[in-house]
Image: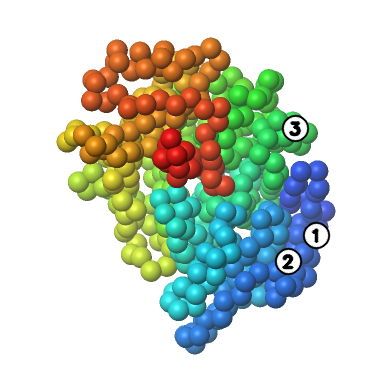
Amino acid sequence: MTIIERLRQYKELEPHKIALIIDDTKYTYSELYDAILSIDIDDTSHIVNLTEVKESAKNKVLLIQSQYFLEQLVQWLGALYRCYIPMVCHNEMDTEYIDELAHIIADEGVLPLTDFGVLTSGTTGRPKPLWRKEESWREFFDIQNNIFHINEDTKIFLQGSFSFTGVSNMVVAVLWAGGTIVTTSSLRPTRWIELLERYEVDHIYALPTKLRLLIRHCKCKLSTINYIIAGSQVLDRHLMEQLQQLCPNMEFILYYGASELNYITYCTGKEWLDREGTVGRPFPTVRIKADDGVIYVTTKYHIEGISDTYTVNDCGYIDTEGYLMFTGRQGDVVNKGGYKISIPSMETYLQSIDGVSEVAIIDIIDDVKGEDFVAYMVLEDNVLVADVMETIRHHRPSIEWPKSIYSIPMLPLTECSKVDKRKLKEWYNKG
């Protein structure tokens, strides 16, 4: 059964069931399916005609440029229904780059059997197109939904663009299960809290950056939350403890994945606390190994054009109990006069210091040492940069001290909810 056939089934069997709540507007499964069928593709986005197309392959790519979640979702599903190849553009992509992307796709074409495209997050450079078959997600939905406790009764809150692979996969997986998605375009945590309480949401899907914002602004218990699902950004014990206080009935689920490979490993909050730094054990059907410190993943639920065993050049090792310990990406290291400092490990340490709410490190050029790093921090009330630096000097060798620490009210985020380190580097270079 395809994704579209599944939605048609829900329209027929449970037409009045709520599929989406966007701010204060509700959309039933019947309304969602009707919107998919009625959308005029030619009036909505940039269509790329593929010149050299193999027999039975699709011949049009739809670059979806809307910045509105509902339009992104409906156009994506509508394109699947009409046998186009949809790809949602990131909100910050300008017209010039979208045109450039269209030319690249027209010249290079897409891989055989492609049903849709996704874009990398672009945190380490320009977003790149990746191509997928529908079943690379569809056939894994039941597996991931079982791990994440998602079913027809689920009401899940998430916030972000459908162009982010983590958001789009989770949204379609919840619709596949017959659940309800609650979302908003607002970046205000107070608005998120209003929706969580009003609709008695039981799941939250968010990266730690947004969970920290939620904690900072929420003044009450969120007792309806049963599960928080988070991607494997920098975690710390204090954040886990704060989340447990905020949501006393919740179980925390951490996952590790990649746009190229889908979900890879997962663990509960308790497992993480017992093995700080782990990203868990493999999802069912997925196998992992570490070779010379590089993680290799074996799965059939990957993008087109790569082998079943593949690496995205993430680094780590597997402990004696089969848990993957993640240590960062290749090259995610500062070579400070020959002394190598892992950026993820240093961020984890700085995050653990009392009074540090959020932290991000950027590498910089140094005339003497070649490379160095600076840290941007969001500090709790009455905590001074001098206090943090004093703690670092007492606990780390001088070679590991940051060149500078900058206190800022909020870390800049990309639309994918990751720290926007390019923006931090712009700030640093402007001095």
First of labels 1, 2 by sequence position: 1
First of labels 3, 1 by sequence position: 1
Locate residue 89 relative to residue 38 in the image: left or right: left
Percent x, y of residue 50: 52, 81
**Three-letter amino acid code at disc 2?**
Ile
SS of the residue at dot 1? helix
Task: Name the mark nearer the viewer: 2 or 3.
Answer: 3
**Three-letter amino acid code at disc 1?**
Glu
Task: Examine the rendering and report whether any part of residue 82 can be seen.
Answer: yes
Residue matched to label 1: 31
- In which quadrant of the rendered view does residue 205 lie? top right
Task: Examine the rendering and report whether any part of residue 283 can be seen.
Answer: no
Q: Which one is in front, 161 or 422?
A: 422
Q: Which one is in front, 276 or 341?
A: 341
The residue depicted at 80 percent of the width and 59 percent of the height is 31
The residue depicted at 48 percent of the width and 52 percent of the height is 121
Other residues around mark 2 within 10 Å, as few (<14) / some (14–19) / many (≥20): many
Q: CA distance from mark 3 to mark 1?
A: 25 Å
Residue 254 vs 306, above or below: the answer is above
Residue 304 vs 262, above or below: the answer is below
Labels 3 and 1 touching (C-beta < 8 A): no
Residue matched to label 2: 36
